[in-house]
Image: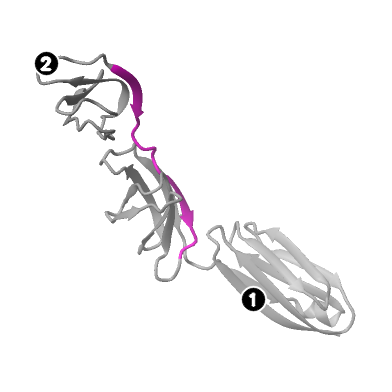
Amino acid sequence: MTAEAGSTIKVSSSAAGEVLSVPATGAAQELAFDLPVGVHALSIVAVDGAGNASPPLSSNATYSAPSAPRLSKLRGTEAAPLRLKVLGAPNDLAHVVLSDGQVVDVRMDSSGDAEVEFVVADGGYTVDALAVDRRGTASAVSHLAVKLDTVAPRLSLKVIKKAAEDGELRLRVHAEEGSRVRIVSKKAKVSKRFRSGSTAKVVEKDIDEGTYRVKVTATDAAGNTTVRKAKITIE
């Protein structure tokens, strides 16, 4: 904006009153000022030393509080079992509070991404987070319930020897309920996947005589994995 040198530039808001009063230089000036959250009808005038005011220039502006950050759980590490991804506006500050009292403040990068880590024991937790912009305005609070499980699932593999003596591959597999189970034996051409239930699953196949290797993997909902292997001789 350009106004007569020696006059005063005044900016007023319909919602906040006068928000700026600066001396005019007579050259083009950039006006910078903060507004509270809300919708503003702005009026800009120049007032000379005699109190004469120019016709007002009008404009509209809206300032909104930052959006609440979005939280999601990442795969943990041995050093930091609980890891979370935080998504928000670029360069906002994320204030993250865990239900056990731990607090982490982290600045989001230019893409609006950040990660936080907590060292905690297995169990259920609630995470609260809010974003704070450069002016210190806080967003609403977002919430995330998380369950930390770092224990590998139970898994047993039993080879039925009597069946092997009769020329049959027969396995009894019992994994922690709800786990995803995979049974693989390349030589025997066995590849089975299933979701484990409350009882053991029996896998059978007639195969030629020989020695075979079987690998069984169980993966629980948290991504923990248990592996069992067996060597079987079919007669």
x, y (%) of residue 199? Answer: 65, 60
Colouring chosen for the image of the structure: one colour
Q: Quadrant of the C terminus?
A: bottom right
Q: Residue furthest left?
A: 50
| Left or right: residue 227 compared with residue 64 | right
Mark 2 highlights which residue? 51
Question: In which quadrant of the rendered view does residue 25 lie?
Answer: top left
| Left or right: residue 64 compared with residue 22 | right
Mark 1 highlights which residue? 228
Using the image as rendered, state which of residue 126 and residue 166 is in the foreground.
126
Question: In which quadrant of the rendered view does residue 109 lie?
Answer: bottom left
Residue interval drawn in magenta: 57-76
Q: Nearer the viewer, mark 1 or mark 2?
A: 2
User: What number is the disc on residue 32?
Assistant: none
Question: Callout 2: few (<14), some (14-19), or many (20+) C-alpha neighbours within 10 Å?
Answer: few
Query: Amino acid type of disc 2?
Result: Gly
Using the image as rendered, state which of residue 109 and residue 71 is in the foreground.
109
Judge whether residue 152 is colored magenta: no
Q: Secondary structure at mark 1?
A: strand
Query: Amino acid type of disc 1?
Result: Arg
Residue located 69% across and 75% down the image: 158
x, y (%) of residue 40? Answer: 31, 22
Q: Secondary structure at mark 2?
A: loop
